Structures are given as structure tokens and as C-alpha cells.
Amino acid sequence: MPLLVPSFVGCHNDLPSHPDRPYIAPGVAMQDVTFHSSALSRDMPYRVFLPLHINPNVRLPVVYLLHGGNGGFRDWSNDSQVSNFAARGVILVMPEGAFSYYMNAAEKAEDKYEDYTFTDLVSDVEARFPAATTRDKRAIVGISMGGFAAIKIALTRPELFGFVGALSPSIDILHRRFNIKRTGEWWRIRTIFGPLDSEARISRDPFALIKTADPAKTPYIYLTAGENEPLLDPNRRFAGRLKFLHFSYEFRTQHGGHDWNEWNSQTPGCFESLFQHINLSDREPRR
């Protein structure tokens, strides 16, 4: 069995990635896929965990796992034991998101990462694997940058997922002012989201989107933050908005920072909530 390689690095690390040594739980198979994305006009990779033995007559619930900034599609498999949850009868999909926030970039027309992730990728997964095709059997869980994307998609494309998990999401990224020590990141954020106070930026801002989103249609949101990370306060404020506007959600905090130690401690609770909010009992028949 491959060994889990622990990581003590947050998702804004610029060091080279560590070797690819995924943890694969008993009863689980792993497959790496490369497919052509029409939105990006190039081939893109993703990794999948799925049960080793699958009834050929059913389609299984599917969970999309989004990595953080300066991460990659192997992070979830290398830095966590998330494959254990595939053994419970779900397919886990880990796409490559680069440093895109999984958004269509406001100032770089060719970087259509939202269309790639939530149209091209979903279509390829459902054509290639026995993955369910309905909202009640789809979920998305992201860390940091990926958590931001999960929240944004929950508010703008609620028809896609029945459950959204956001672990330490960079919920305030669109409100951060220029910092000369992080000039490179600031320009990347400007390219993705547009200038401060622009329509492009506001249309991607969860704090603005929540004002018009329909709580009755929005998927259940599982939100977490570490008690020792700078993102605790903005996430607590966002949880307050969810409560005030009567969204279905839960907000969990515990001792920890912005790293895989924190996210691994929050993942089991996230998945237990996920299993309560997506349809596991009535597996979708394959056609």
C-alpha cells in the first residue's frame, strides 16, 4: 500500500511539489486521465479514486475535489487519505486547476477555467466513468482557492451540486488591497477577477453574490476555518451572512492553521455531512 506523505505547507507555497506518492485505500482503484478541454483548447489531466468493485448496472455519486493555489491535481491524493471515502461507494475526481481560482479569467480570454472545470470536466467524467449525472448525487469540496470556487459555484450555478464543502476558502481574496510583498499574486488576482470595484470582480465575489442567491436553490454548504489562520475572520463573517439570509449551512472551526494538518482534521466531518446530504441509497441505473 502506498504511504501517505504528510505536508506541512499551506496552499500558497512556491516550493517545488513533492514526489507523487498517493495514498490508495484498500478496495479503491486510482486512475489518471488526460482529456481535451474545448474551453481551454488543450489537454488537461485529472485523477480519480473509485471503488475497486462496482455493480455494472449503477452510476455512483461523484465528488469533485479542488486543490489550492500553487497546488495541483495530485495534492488531495498525496496529502490526505481521502481515498478512504471512495471505498464507501463514491467516485472522487481531482482536476488540475493551476492558479486559476477555477474561474473564467476577466482579463485573459483564453483562460476559461470555470467552463473547463464545470462543463468539460463534468462531461468527460460522466462519459468515461459510472458517475451519476444528477445534482442530488454530485458534490464539490475545495481547499483555500478551491474552497472559494466551491462557494462561488454554489451561489451562481446551484443546479450542479447538492452539497458544497469549503475548507479554509479564500473568501476575502477579492477585497485584499495591493501589497508590495505579494505583487505577483496581486497581478494574478487582477488578471482573473478584474480591477477592484469592477463589474467583473463583483460578479465573482461571494459577499456580493450571496445577496441575490436563492437560499431554497443553493446547495448545502459546509464551511470550515482554522482558529489560527488569517481566513478565520472573513469566513466567520461569511457564515454570519449565510445565517442571516437563511441558507442551509454549517460552520466548523478548530485549532489549526492554513495547511493540510487543518484540512485533514476537517475532512472526515465534511464527508460525514456530505453523505447525509447527497443521495447514496438510490443509485442511478446505467443506461
Image (cartoon, rainbow, N blue to C red):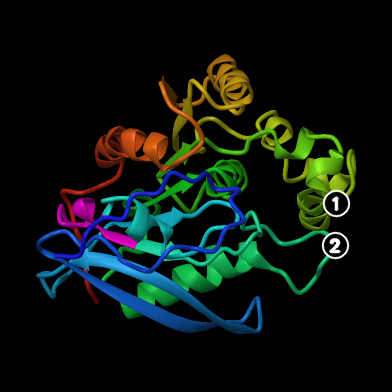
Q: Nearer the viewer, residue 275 or 8?
A: 8
The residue under label 2 is: 107
Q: Give yes or no for residue 85 being in the magenta stretch.
A: yes
Which label sits on residue 230? none
Instruction: Look at the numbered discs 2 and 1 and tell me whether their residues touch, using CB distance below 8 Å.
Output: yes
Q: Position of residue 117 (x, y in %)?
A: 55, 65
Among the 4 quarters of the image, the one containing residue 152: top right
Q: Residue at x 30, y 34 (%)?
A: 273
Instruction: Provide the residue span drawn in magenta.
Output: 83-92
**Is 7 or 255 nearer to us in this picture?**
7
In the image, residue 148 above or below residue 108:
above
At 84% from the left and 35% from the top, the residue drawn is 177
Compared with residue 128, is residue 277 higher up or lower down, i.e. above or below? Answer: above
Residue type at tag 2: Glu
**Residue designated by label 1:** 194
Instruction: Decide if residue 274 is in sight here.
Output: yes
Query: Which residue lies at the image location 56% right of the left edge and 38% below the top edge?
Result: 169
Q: What kind of element bears circle 2?
A: loop
Mark 2–mark 1 distance (CA, rounded to whole Å): 6 Å
> Is any part of residue 63 visible from this angle?
no
As displayed, is residue 260 above or below residue 29?
A: above
User: Considering the image in quadrants, where does the N terminus appear?
Assistant: bottom left
Which amino acid, mark 1?
Gly
Q: Whole-percent x and y of residue 96?
A: 52, 67
Q: Residue at point 40% right, 49% down? A: 7
Q: Is residue 267 left or right of residue 24?
A: right
